[in-house]
Image: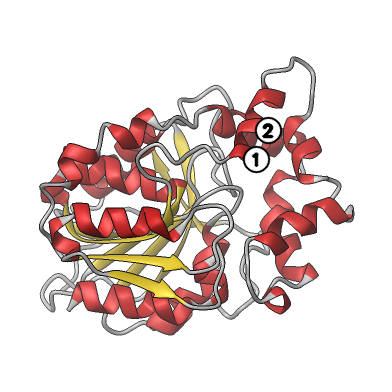
Amino acid sequence: MGTAAPAARSLRGVQAVASGLVPKQVQRVGPAELAYLETGRRDDDAGTPTVFFLHGTPTHAFLWRKVLRLLGDDDVHCIAYDLMGLGDTVVSPYEDFTAPMQAEILLDWLDKWSLESVVLVGHEVGGAVAQQVVANHPERVRGLVLVDTVCYDNWPHPLVAQAMRLARTPGLDTVAYALGLPRRIAHARIGFLRAVHDKTCMSPDVVDAYLRPIETVEGRERARRFLLAADNRYTLECVPGLRKFDAPTAVVWGADDVFLSPSWGKRLAEDIPGANGKLDLVAFCGHLVPEEEPTAVVDAVRGVVA
């Protein structure tokens, strides 16, 4: 029989998933009410692996909806949650949103659910959180999938750095300015359209779902402070640990990513022993691989689990 997880409550009224998945639930971990999607069922006796999915900015767990649907319910237990500062996770905007703190929250969650080791899947800034766990607590990671992730000193991207400079200006609603909110303004959509190769997958409804959590003043303030927490020293300090990590690893990258060059993925694949030097390059695909080519992520996860 599977070990029961602490009781969670459903996050009603949140239209974060419009593709047949259950609504987000909420779990209290440390200072935050973490909002998350859960599919599959934990069964320790059957050896069912638990996979945690970590998104980037300015997305949230909605990013993984297609991947979770394709993985199904039977042979893998999936948790996709909203990092502190983004999505529907409720936390003080004055909390520590750095990658090390995000990693500590994840480790606290694993302890709370008595999960000794899990598979981590990280996209962009979520990949920085995964790298923190791998570098400092490799025994808690049974497998790793990095998707178009920040790494080494490749972040923040110049566009994000520009937003960070604006974010330090007192009284300026930086996130609203940088993303062109309200959401009907074309600038908001242009940013998401640049993140994909196939523009048809980024419909107005999909962009609206991504932007919904930062339409409130409180949501934008959390996102502003999340932006200010970006610092490449948190990935640079992980490099020695990555170079020792020999558990199954997959590195997946959109060949047409205009924000993070695939050359970073090649370097990661060569540095991490568990990746065996192999980069999964997804043709005709941009930065948001889980949105545009979810089967590539599914294949990577199944390969690592196997």
- Element under disc 1: helix
Where does the image place residue 19, in percent across and percent down from the top left?
A: 61, 78
Question: Which quadrant does the C terminus fall into?
Answer: bottom left
Dot in front, 2 or 1: 1
- Examine the rendering and report whether any part of residue 246 can be seen: yes
Q: Residue at x 40, y 72 (%)?
A: 281
The residue at the far right in this view is 185
> Percent position (x, y) of residue 107?
26, 42
Q: CA distance from mark 2 to mark 1?
A: 6 Å
Where's residue 112, x and y in %? 25, 46
Q: Quadrant location of the N terminus?
A: bottom left
Q: Residue furthest top?
A: 170
Can residue 22 be seen by looking at this rendering?
A: no
Q: Are marks 2 and 1 in contact (CB under 8 Å)?
A: yes
Name the residue at 26% across, 82% down. Answer: 75
The picture quadrant where one finds residue 90 is top right
Q: How many marks?
A: 2
Residue displayed at 59% across by 49% down? 87
What residue sits right under mark 1 in the picture? 159
Q: Residues within 10 Å of mark 2 (few under 14, many from 20)?
A: many
Q: Amino acid at mark 2?
A: Ala
For mark 2, what is the residue?
163
Q: Nearer the viewer, residue 227 or 261?
A: 261
Taking 231 as reference, is 244 left or right? left
Label 2 residue SS: helix
Task: Assess disc 1: are there few (<14), some (14-19) or many (≥20) residues with their C-alpha within 10 Å of its C-alpha.
Answer: few
